[in-house]
Protein backbone atom coordinates (compact mmCIF):
# COMPACT_ATOMS: atom_id res chain seq x y z
CA UNK A 1 0.00 0.00 0.00
CA UNK A 2 1.51 3.25 -1.16
CA UNK A 3 1.02 5.47 1.81
CA UNK A 4 0.83 2.93 4.60
CA UNK A 5 3.83 2.92 6.95
CA UNK A 6 4.08 6.67 6.47
CA UNK A 7 3.95 8.98 9.45
CA UNK A 8 3.62 12.72 9.12
CA UNK A 9 6.80 14.60 9.90
CA UNK A 10 9.57 12.13 9.86
CA UNK A 11 12.69 13.09 7.94
CA UNK A 12 13.75 12.16 4.42
CA UNK A 13 13.51 12.79 0.70
CA UNK A 14 10.96 11.57 -1.81
CA UNK A 15 12.20 8.64 -3.84
CA UNK A 16 10.93 7.06 -7.01
CA UNK A 17 12.46 3.74 -7.95
CA UNK A 18 12.77 3.27 -11.69
CA UNK A 19 14.68 0.51 -13.43
CA UNK A 20 16.42 -0.39 -10.21
CA UNK A 21 17.72 3.13 -9.56
CA UNK A 22 16.61 5.45 -6.81
CA UNK A 23 15.89 8.97 -8.01
CA UNK A 24 15.55 11.50 -5.19
CA UNK A 25 12.99 14.26 -5.60
CA UNK A 26 14.59 17.37 -4.18
CA UNK A 27 13.10 20.69 -3.32
CA UNK A 28 13.61 23.96 -5.14
CA UNK A 29 15.88 25.40 -2.45
CA UNK A 30 18.10 22.35 -2.36
CA UNK A 31 18.53 22.30 -6.12
CA UNK A 32 19.80 25.86 -6.00
CA UNK A 33 22.49 24.85 -3.48
CA UNK A 34 24.07 21.86 -5.21
CA UNK A 35 27.45 23.58 -5.12
CA UNK A 36 27.43 23.14 -1.36
CA UNK A 37 27.16 19.35 -1.68
CA UNK A 38 23.79 19.07 0.02
CA UNK A 39 23.18 15.67 -1.47
CA UNK A 40 21.47 14.47 1.65
CA UNK A 41 18.51 16.73 0.85
CA UNK A 42 17.04 19.89 2.28
CA UNK A 43 14.46 17.84 4.11
CA UNK A 44 17.09 16.77 6.62
CA UNK A 45 17.73 18.93 9.64
CA UNK A 46 20.18 18.74 12.52
CA UNK A 47 19.49 16.48 15.47
CA UNK A 48 19.12 19.54 17.65
CA UNK A 49 16.25 20.97 15.63
CA UNK A 50 14.62 17.70 14.68
CA UNK A 51 11.20 17.02 16.24
CA UNK A 52 11.03 14.10 18.63
CA UNK A 53 9.16 11.89 16.20
CA UNK A 54 11.83 12.18 13.51
CA UNK A 55 13.83 8.99 13.06
CA UNK A 56 16.80 7.89 11.01
CA UNK A 57 14.97 4.92 9.57
CA UNK A 58 11.81 6.58 8.33
CA UNK A 59 11.05 9.27 5.79
CA UNK A 60 9.14 12.47 6.38
CA UNK A 61 6.02 12.28 4.26
CA UNK A 62 7.93 9.98 1.95
CA UNK A 63 6.54 10.26 -1.56
CA UNK A 64 3.82 7.67 -1.85
CA UNK A 65 4.53 6.93 -5.48
CA UNK A 66 7.45 4.59 -4.94
CA UNK A 67 6.77 1.90 -7.50
CA UNK A 68 8.59 -1.33 -7.93
CA UNK A 69 9.87 -2.13 -11.39
CA UNK A 70 7.08 -4.66 -11.75
CA UNK A 71 4.37 -2.18 -10.80
CA UNK A 72 5.54 0.38 -13.33
CA UNK A 73 6.16 -2.14 -16.07
CA UNK A 74 9.95 -1.89 -16.03
CA UNK A 75 10.66 -5.34 -14.64
CA UNK A 76 13.58 -6.93 -16.46
CA UNK A 77 12.68 -10.43 -17.60
CA UNK A 78 13.80 -12.80 -20.31
CA UNK A 79 10.80 -11.68 -22.34
CA UNK A 80 10.20 -7.94 -21.86
CA UNK A 81 6.61 -7.03 -21.19
CA UNK A 82 4.85 -5.54 -24.19
CA UNK A 83 2.99 -2.27 -23.92
CA UNK A 84 -0.25 -4.18 -24.30
CA UNK A 85 0.56 -6.06 -21.09
CA UNK A 86 0.81 -2.88 -19.02
CA UNK A 87 -2.18 -1.49 -17.20
CA UNK A 88 -3.46 1.97 -17.99
CA UNK A 89 -2.21 3.03 -14.56
CA UNK A 90 1.34 1.96 -15.42
CA UNK A 91 1.15 3.65 -18.80
CA UNK A 92 -0.09 6.87 -17.23
CA UNK A 93 2.79 6.80 -14.74
CA UNK A 94 5.23 6.32 -17.61
CA UNK A 95 3.74 9.20 -19.59
CA UNK A 96 2.79 7.09 -22.59
CA UNK A 97 -0.16 9.15 -23.77
CA UNK A 98 -0.59 7.27 -27.04
CA UNK A 99 -0.97 3.92 -25.29
CA UNK A 100 -3.24 5.47 -22.67
CA UNK A 101 -5.42 6.70 -25.53
CA UNK A 102 -5.38 3.24 -27.11
CA UNK A 103 -6.57 1.64 -23.89
CA UNK A 104 -9.35 4.20 -23.51
CA UNK A 105 -10.50 3.64 -27.07
CA UNK A 106 -10.90 -0.03 -26.23
CA UNK A 107 -12.59 0.56 -22.87
CA UNK A 108 -13.70 4.06 -21.87
CA UNK A 109 -14.46 2.90 -18.32
CA UNK A 110 -10.71 2.74 -17.70
CA UNK A 111 -10.71 6.53 -17.43
CA UNK A 112 -11.99 6.36 -13.86
CA UNK A 113 -10.76 2.85 -13.01
CA UNK A 114 -9.21 2.67 -9.56
CA UNK A 115 -6.50 0.14 -8.81
CA UNK A 116 -6.11 -1.80 -5.57
CA UNK A 117 -4.91 1.36 -3.82
CA UNK A 118 -7.77 3.41 -5.16
CA UNK A 119 -5.49 5.31 -7.55
CA UNK A 120 -6.82 6.36 -10.95
CA UNK A 121 -4.71 6.82 -14.09
CA UNK A 122 -4.90 10.58 -13.48
CA UNK A 123 -3.48 10.16 -9.99
CA UNK A 124 -0.56 8.11 -11.26
CA UNK A 125 0.19 10.67 -13.96
CA UNK A 126 0.04 13.49 -11.40
CA UNK A 127 2.31 11.60 -9.02
CA UNK A 128 5.02 11.23 -11.65
CA UNK A 129 4.71 14.69 -13.18
CA UNK A 130 3.38 13.48 -16.51
CA UNK A 131 1.70 16.74 -17.52
CA UNK A 132 0.79 15.64 -21.05
CA UNK A 133 -1.06 12.61 -19.72
CA UNK A 134 -2.73 14.69 -17.02
CA UNK A 135 -4.00 17.16 -19.62
CA UNK A 136 -5.18 14.35 -21.89
CA UNK A 137 -7.07 12.54 -19.14
CA UNK A 138 -8.72 15.74 -17.91
CA UNK A 139 -9.75 16.56 -21.47
CA UNK A 140 -11.33 13.11 -21.68
CA UNK A 141 -13.32 13.79 -18.52
CA UNK A 142 -11.24 12.23 -15.75
CA UNK A 143 -12.42 13.30 -12.30
CA UNK A 144 -9.61 15.22 -10.56
CA UNK A 145 -11.50 15.08 -7.25
CA UNK A 146 -11.28 11.30 -6.82
CA UNK A 147 -9.98 10.22 -3.42
CA UNK A 148 -8.01 6.98 -2.99
CA UNK A 149 -8.25 4.46 -0.18
CA UNK A 150 -5.94 6.38 2.14
CA UNK A 151 -7.51 9.68 1.07
CA UNK A 152 -4.72 10.50 -1.35
CA UNK A 153 -5.64 12.88 -4.14
CA UNK A 154 -4.10 13.92 -7.43
CA UNK A 155 -3.39 17.35 -5.96
CA UNK A 156 -1.63 15.90 -2.92
CA UNK A 157 0.53 13.67 -5.10
CA UNK A 158 1.46 16.48 -7.48
CA UNK A 159 2.26 18.79 -4.57
CA UNK A 160 4.43 16.15 -2.94
CA UNK A 161 6.38 15.72 -6.17
CA UNK A 162 6.81 19.45 -6.74
CA UNK A 163 5.00 19.48 -10.07
CA UNK A 164 3.69 23.05 -10.00
CA UNK A 165 2.31 22.96 -13.54
CA UNK A 166 0.10 20.01 -12.61
CA UNK A 167 -0.84 21.61 -9.29
CA UNK A 168 -2.02 24.73 -11.11
CA UNK A 169 -3.93 22.68 -13.67
CA UNK A 170 -5.74 20.69 -10.99
CA UNK A 171 -6.61 23.86 -9.08
CA UNK A 172 -8.18 25.28 -12.24
CA UNK A 173 -10.37 22.18 -12.32
CA UNK A 174 -11.84 22.95 -8.92
CA UNK A 175 -10.21 20.36 -6.68
CA UNK A 176 -10.32 20.77 -2.90
CA UNK A 177 -7.17 22.71 -2.07
CA UNK A 178 -7.29 21.67 1.59
CA UNK A 179 -7.98 17.98 1.08
CA UNK A 180 -6.24 15.81 3.66
CA UNK A 181 -5.03 12.23 3.61
CA UNK A 182 -5.10 9.50 6.24
CA UNK A 183 -2.51 11.19 8.46
CA UNK A 184 -3.75 14.74 8.06
CA UNK A 185 -1.34 15.73 5.34
CA UNK A 186 -2.62 18.48 3.03
CA UNK A 187 -1.20 19.49 -0.36
CA UNK A 188 0.41 22.52 1.31
CA UNK A 189 2.04 20.41 4.00
CA UNK A 190 3.43 18.03 1.39
CA UNK A 191 4.76 20.92 -0.70
CA UNK A 192 6.44 22.38 2.39
CA UNK A 193 7.91 19.02 3.30
CA UNK A 194 9.38 18.63 -0.18
CA UNK A 195 10.80 22.16 -0.13
CA UNK A 196 8.83 22.90 -3.28
CA UNK A 197 8.68 26.68 -3.16
CA UNK A 198 6.74 27.20 -6.37
CA UNK A 199 4.08 24.71 -5.30
CA UNK A 200 3.78 26.41 -1.93
CA UNK A 201 3.35 29.78 -3.63
CA UNK A 202 0.76 28.41 -6.05
CA UNK A 203 -1.26 26.83 -3.26
CA UNK A 204 -1.13 29.94 -1.09
CA UNK A 205 -2.18 32.11 -4.02
CA UNK A 206 -5.32 30.01 -4.39
CA UNK A 207 -6.22 30.14 -0.72
CA UNK A 208 -4.62 27.11 0.92
CA UNK A 209 -5.26 27.17 4.66
CA UNK A 210 -2.00 27.74 6.54
CA UNK A 211 -3.58 26.94 9.90
CA UNK A 212 -4.37 23.28 9.19
CA UNK A 213 -2.15 20.92 11.18
CA UNK A 214 -1.29 17.32 10.53
CA UNK A 215 -2.32 14.61 12.95
CA UNK A 216 1.14 15.00 14.48
CA UNK A 217 0.40 18.64 15.25
CA UNK A 218 2.55 20.39 12.68
CA UNK A 219 1.38 23.43 10.76
CA UNK A 220 3.09 24.39 7.49
CA UNK A 221 5.20 27.00 9.30
CA UNK A 222 6.16 24.63 12.11
CA UNK A 223 7.22 22.02 9.57
CA UNK A 224 9.26 24.52 7.56
CA UNK A 225 11.06 25.63 10.72
CA UNK A 226 11.69 22.05 11.86
CA UNK A 227 13.19 21.12 8.50
CA UNK A 228 15.20 24.28 8.10
CA UNK A 229 13.47 25.32 4.89
CA UNK A 230 14.29 29.01 5.23
CA UNK A 231 12.96 30.13 1.86
CA UNK A 232 9.68 28.38 2.55
CA UNK A 233 9.54 30.13 5.91
CA UNK A 234 9.93 33.50 4.19
CA UNK A 235 7.17 32.68 1.72
CA UNK A 236 4.83 31.71 4.55
CA UNK A 237 5.76 34.76 6.62
CA UNK A 238 5.10 37.08 3.68
CA UNK A 239 1.74 35.41 3.10
CA UNK A 240 0.77 35.81 6.76
CA UNK A 241 1.73 39.49 6.71
CA UNK A 242 -0.46 40.02 3.66
CA UNK A 243 -3.39 38.29 5.33
CA UNK A 244 -3.21 40.38 8.47
CA UNK A 245 -2.11 43.66 6.97
CA UNK A 246 -4.57 46.33 8.15
CA UNK A 247 -6.50 48.09 5.38
CA UNK A 248 -5.13 51.47 4.39
Image (spheres, grey):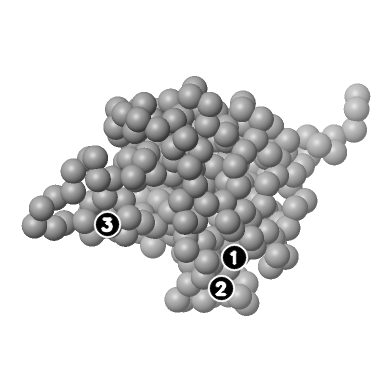
As helix, strand or loop, the secondary structure at mark 1 comes to loop
Residue at left offset 61%, top offset 75%:
53
- Seen in the picture, residue 54 relative to 234 is either above or below; the reply is below
Which residue sits at x=59%, y=58%?
A: 150
**What is the crowding at mark 1: few (fewer than 14 residues within 10 Å), some, or many (at least 20)?**
many
Where does label 1 land, which residue?
Answer: 9
How far apart are the alpha carbons under marks 1 and 2?
7 Å
In this rendering, position of residue 100 left or right of residue 60: left
> Gap in Å between the C-alphas at discs 3 and 1?
27 Å
Looking at the figure, which quarter contains the C terminus? top right
Other residues around mark 2 within 10 Å, as few (<14) / some (14–19) / many (≥20): some
Indicate the position of residue 90 as horizontal and vertical percent values.
34, 45
Q: Nearer the viewer, mark 3 or mark 2?
A: 3
SS class, disc 2: loop
Residue 120 versus residue 66: which sits nearer the camera?
Answer: 120
Q: Which residue is mark 3?
A: 69
Residue in front for this viewpoint, 181 or 222:
181
Amino acid sequence: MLWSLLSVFQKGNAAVRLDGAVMESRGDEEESNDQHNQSSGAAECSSNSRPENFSDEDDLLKHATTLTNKQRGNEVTVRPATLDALSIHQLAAQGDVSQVATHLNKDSSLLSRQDERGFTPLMWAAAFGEKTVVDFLLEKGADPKTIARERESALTLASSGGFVDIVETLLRHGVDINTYDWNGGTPLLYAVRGNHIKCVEALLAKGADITIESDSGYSPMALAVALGHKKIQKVLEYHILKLYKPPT
